[in-house]
Amino acid sequence: MNMPVFPRPDRRPFFSAGRAGWLLLLVMVWAGRLSAQNLFSNPGFESGTTGWSGNSSAVFTSSTAKSHSGSRSAYLTNRTATWNGVVQSVAGVLQNTNTYYVSAWVLIDNATNQPANLTLQKTDASGLSYTHIAACTGNSNTWTQMTGNFTLNVVGVLTNLTIYIEGPGSNVSFYADDFLLTNVPPYDWKPAANARIEQIRKRDVRVQITDSNGLVVPGTTVQVRQRKHQFAFGTAINGNVSNPQYAGFVKTNFEWAVMENESKWYSDEPSRSNVTYTAADTLTNFCCTNGIKLRGHCLFWAVDSTVQAWVTNLSDADLRTHLTNRLNSAVNHFLGTFGAWDVNNEMLHGNYYGNRLGNGINSWMFQYARSLNPNLQLFVNDYNVVAGGETDAYKQQIQNLIASNAVVGGIGCQGHFGSTIDPTLTEQRLDNLAQLNIPIWITEYDSLNADENVRADNLETLYRMAFSKPAVDGILMWGFWAGSHWRGSNAAIVNLDWTVNAAGRRYQSLLAEWTTTTNGTADAGGGFYFRGFHGDYDLTITPPGGVAAVQHITVAAGAGTNLVAVTVPPAVPPGFSAGAIRQLPDRNLSLTATGSVGTPYRLWANTNLVAATNSWNLLGGGNIPNNPFTLYDLTATNYPRRFYRFSSP
Ligand SMILES: [Ca+2]
């Protein structure tokens, strides 16, 4: 095993430190060595080819032509297949069930946008397997880092275990340097995450209940039901909203949605100047009808293969015109529907419009969209950022956009994860991006694992970690149902037969954990206290002997206690008691009451509980016909909220 590559400690303190200082320094050096020890032998190729070998017929040399650090790197040439690379055995180095962090740097020789991977090759009782444990897109002008992590899972006897770099197209030569393989100590991350969630996602609320004479009303019962979250929990949706089971799951489990394809340019303008929003409008109508918010995806898509053929055939001048037309059309069509847009999807992995018209076109897209609606939150959106090792590249790209006068209002991290999700890496990458002080959204979460319990753990790791980070404002998953998931049933949280699998149940339990539901009674001062997650609530408030009324409140993020003043209506007529208000299937209301048959009453309604008495609407009245009796308000759905009170005529 090679010596660690981290810098040797500065020796100067040894000459001035006392005995305690000596001991402390020795402990620190030892601890650093334990956590940072590089398990690769000759990781920077400074000892030539020692410890490494070329895969197959590729020619592997230790080159002095290029290096990421030191004076040498691995150089792979005469490659005949994408899997030709440089390999090192790690059998006997790695321990079963341990988690490892792995990283390497790659520089492509005379080619651009070449995929590169670190791959774990394993042979055990379960057979031969290959697992990509890190990935990046390499180029010839700059060294690119790939990072990842994996947990070693050996079945039976291990007969072979190697890690190798591969991926660039056959015949493409490349350099590789500074391989790093370290043990990831178990990280008990949940308690810290939960403590952050308690601090940043919740607020103390005091409900002060007073009657219309200004007197506090002790004993008022308060039922607290959170209806919406300030944090965005959502999913991608598609035309399956016409399926009642699909639609039902969306309505029950998500507050936000994004159109999977229907608001992309290739859907909205499939042929030149043939603009159609029919499919998108179906989804918009579904969301608006059901109170689901939408984010826009995407105005453009930078990856060559996603650009419509008719666009690729345009002259540069016509292309500029059609980019302008697309922005005018889409931003205006979805005005009031999308508060946010992904502007040019996946600019880390393609640059179609920049290659055609110069890189200034990318910041122009932001500038022009903003000129159409300065309130739009304009996002970058890309993959391999939190789920891969391209966080630094993404940061740099965002900084470059900002420097060219693009107002980047949101950072979209797609979040397409592999078979496991490492909390340490996820946290590091989110914290790294958060340094830009721009809101982060996980826009397209999924993970792919045949074991639904691992999928559930993955989902919890991403959701709990992201929800605990103040920079993150939302998480949308990229589909949920096995019958309509782009990565297939092993990424779904709902099975083909609509049973909710372990991953889906975990999602539902997390949402329940992060939703405030409580009940109580006002104290002697008419005060009722609770601590709740930020969001919208219905409070059902019932003064002693009075009628229940539902009041809508918002618990907003902020310092100190959120104060909510509630004024309750006068008491009901003597010999009469109001009962429950129930929501009918059509969202209208029924009110039940009991009282002496023949007692006269009137029923009033208002959207404002503390409005002047003479501004209330008389809904009806008469003499109590039977006991109990039921009244209906079939206009209730016309109002965002409504209060009721009874009076003597
Ligand atoms: Ca080197």
Image (cartoon, rainbow, N blue to C red):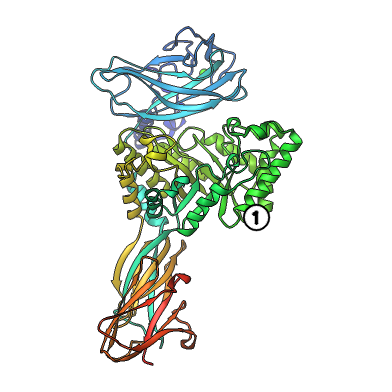
- Image check: 251 left or right of 433? left
Relative vertical location of residue 18 with respect to residue 368 in this rendering, above or below: above
Q: Nearer the viewer, residue 412 or 202?
A: 412
The percent coordinates of residue 69 (x first, y second) are 54, 22
Q: Residue furthest left?
A: 156
Figure quadrant of residue 159:
top left
Which residue is label 1 attached to? 374
The residue type indicated by label 1 comes to: Pro
Q: Nearer the viewer, residue 579 or 79?
A: 579
Q: Nearer the viewer, residue 199 or 456?
A: 456
Asked if residue 299 shows in the view, the reply is yes
Q: Residue at x 46, y 87 (%)?
A: 613
- Image check: 323 left or right of 465? right
Q: Residue at x 41, y 74 (%)?
A: 634
Q: Nearer the viewer, residue 223 or 140?
A: 223
Figure quadrant of residue 251:
bottom left
Relative vertical location of residue 292 with respect to residue 518 in this rendering, above or below: above
Asked if residue 602 shows in the view, the reply is no
The percent coordinates of residue 539 (x first, y second) are 37, 70
